Image: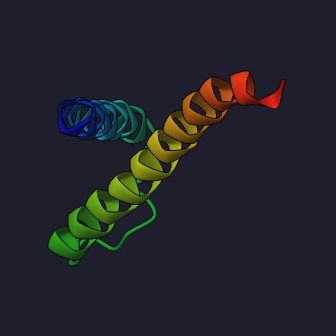
Amino acid sequence: MLQDLGIEALINIVSHLFFITVTWQVIRAVRLDEIFSKNRILEARIFILFVTIMIGSAVSNFVIDLLTWSQRLLYLF
């Protein structure tokens, strides 16, 4: 029982880190530097970091929820 919770926590951590990394790579491919002014480089990087974490976490939560719900479909019948 407790081991299942540990495995679930590990899967959640790996999923979040994976999707945050993928989101970071995608955002780096988009030319967002042109949107921010030249004097605000630090603020732009922090903003991009926060947006990356938000999007990556949201996608990870969606995937984890979808997997959880699909496993619970067994209890429908």
In the image, residue 7 above or below residue 37: above
Q: How many marks?
A: 0
Q: Residue at x 56, y 34 (%)?
A: 68
Which quadrant of the figure has residue 33? Answer: bottom left
In the picture, the quarter occupied by the N terminus is top left
- Left or right of 6, for residue 66: right
Nearest to the observer: residue 7 or residue 61 = 7
Seen as rendered, the residue at the extreme right is 77
Place of residue 76 in the rendered image (x, y in percent of width and height, measured from the top left): 81, 30
Q: Judge left or right: residue 8 versus residue 74.
A: left
Q: Quadrant of residue 69?
A: top right
Does residue 25 lie above or below 24 as drawn?
above
Q: Tell me, yes or no, if residue 70 can be seen here.
A: yes
- Quadrant position of the C terminus in the picture: top right
The one of 23 and 48 positioned closer to us in this rendering: 23
- Say if 38 sits above or below 63 in the image: below
Please name the residue shown 61% across and 25% down the image: 71
Counting from the top left corner in percent of width and height, residue 63 is at: 54, 34
For image coordinates 23% across by 75% down, the residue present is 43
- Residue 72 position in % (x across, y down): 65, 31
Q: Quadrant of residue 70?
A: top right
Task: Please say if 44 is above or below 29.
Answer: below
Foreground residue among 11 and 50: 11
